[in-house]
Image: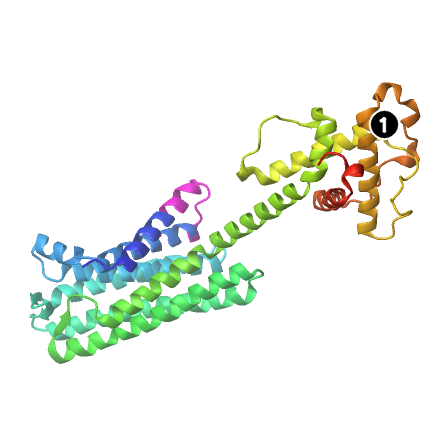
Amino acid sequence: MTDPVLACAAVLLLGLSTYRFFARGRRGRTPALRHTCCFAWCFGAFLELMAGQTRADIDHGTGLAGLSGMFTDHLKMGSAGFLALAAVSLRRPAADARALRLRQAGTALAVLSATVLFLLAGIREDGGQMVATGAFGPVALAGYDLVITGYVTCCLVTLARQTLHWTRQADTTALRTALGLITLTAAIGLLWAAWGFDDVLGALRSGRQLTTEDPVSLVLGRLCAVLLLAGATTLLWARAGRAARRWRAAYRSYRSLGPLWRALHAAFPQIALSSGRMPPADAELALYRRVIEIRDGLLILRRYRTAEAPAGAGGAPRGTDAAARAEATRIADALLRARVRDPDDGAPGTVPPAAEPHLPHIGGMEAETRWLGQIAQALRTLPPRAAGPR
């Protein structure tokens, strides 16, 4: 029976790592990225073997008892080794390749030792168990388990120490969360590896070992897979969340400018830069275009403004809301004048510099959008006679 959790985790790991490897291009593949992708490929294949009946198919297809178990254990060792290599490559300068070469040699030696011990054990299958039949079968099988468990433990300790160091230096919440999840994955992996010492004792006592993972190992494997995926994708989800919040803020600002834009567009249709509507995915671009169109409309409206504030403006505004309401009243008054006056014969309505639109000091697109939004909301609340079309 296929384990859906492990199968889904395997597919996601393999797909995500492959995408990252080829998306970076040849020049962008740093040693850390290569080692991380190799880890994901090894661990994804390991989870895929644990998830279904592939192990049994390998054993029956080749006729070699325990071959799938050895292959699975080698994938586990490779996963841990590549994790340690990734941690070392990020910790040390690129010019210091000695540590990487030592780690690679250690990985090769551990895999070779485990293979030799497995062959010396003379494994055969008996009722879902691997039985050591060689002269030194139980000792060789126990040594095989000890090499795998010890090597994985050493690699996970290296990873945990490095991620703890990085977590303390992380400057963003998302990065700290991702590193914290990876550190927790390493801790669960250490517990998972430590559980393998039970196989060492069992091999010494009886020379027997299960061909599949026991229930505790499966639970720990699921936890590692879920936590690892959560940690590996935290930054992606954080980036997607920031993009969604930016889209929401831009769309809300776009909607808030509606009353002012519609009033100006009704009087001056030529301010529209395009007759088509922007798709919802382009909320920031649509907001930018709407601000430009409003600015164009306000520039055209200058010829219809008067030097004196219209009645109801409340004199010199003292606060931001009062300033926005006063400016909205001036705009509404100018719009009423624009509907009944030809701009070319309205020389008396042309304003001197003192009657320019009220523009406070604007510190950027966000501040300008906020100011225009306040004017738009004030314009929406004005009496219909003064506000004109909305």
Number of numbered labels in the structure image: 1
Quarter of the image containing the C terminus?
top right
Q: Position of residue 379 (x, y in %)?
A: 76, 42
Going 51% across and 67% down the picture, which residue do you hit? 165
From the viewer's perspective, is 260 left or right of 158? right
From the viewer's perspective, is 138 left or right of 92? left
89 inside magenta stretch: no
Residue closest to the eye, 103 or 201: 201
Residue 98 visible from this viewpoint: no
From the viewer's perspective, is 64 left or right of 46? left
Identify the residue under disc 1.
Answer: 303
Residue closest to the eye, 271 or 77: 271
30 inside magenta stretch: yes
Residue 197, quarter of the rendered image: bottom left
Quarter of the image containing the N terminus?
bottom left
Q: Position of residue 253 (x, y in %)?
A: 65, 44
Against 273, residue 100 (above or below) is below
Q: Which residues are magenta?
A: 18-32
Rendered image coloring scheme? rainbow
Going 93% across and 37% down the picture, which residue do you hit? 308
Q: Secondary structure at mark 1?
A: helix
Going 85% across and 27% down the picture, which residue do you hit? 303
The furthest residue to the bottom: 205
Identified by mark 1, the residue type is Arg
Residue 194, quarter of the rendered image: bottom left
Q: Position of residue 332 (x, y in %)?
A: 80, 36
From the viewer's perspective, is 190 left or right of 141? right
Q: How many residues crowd mark 1 within 10 Å: few (<14), some (14–19), many (20+)?
A: many
Residue 227 visible from this viewpoint: yes
Q: Position of residue 331 (x, y in %)?
A: 81, 36
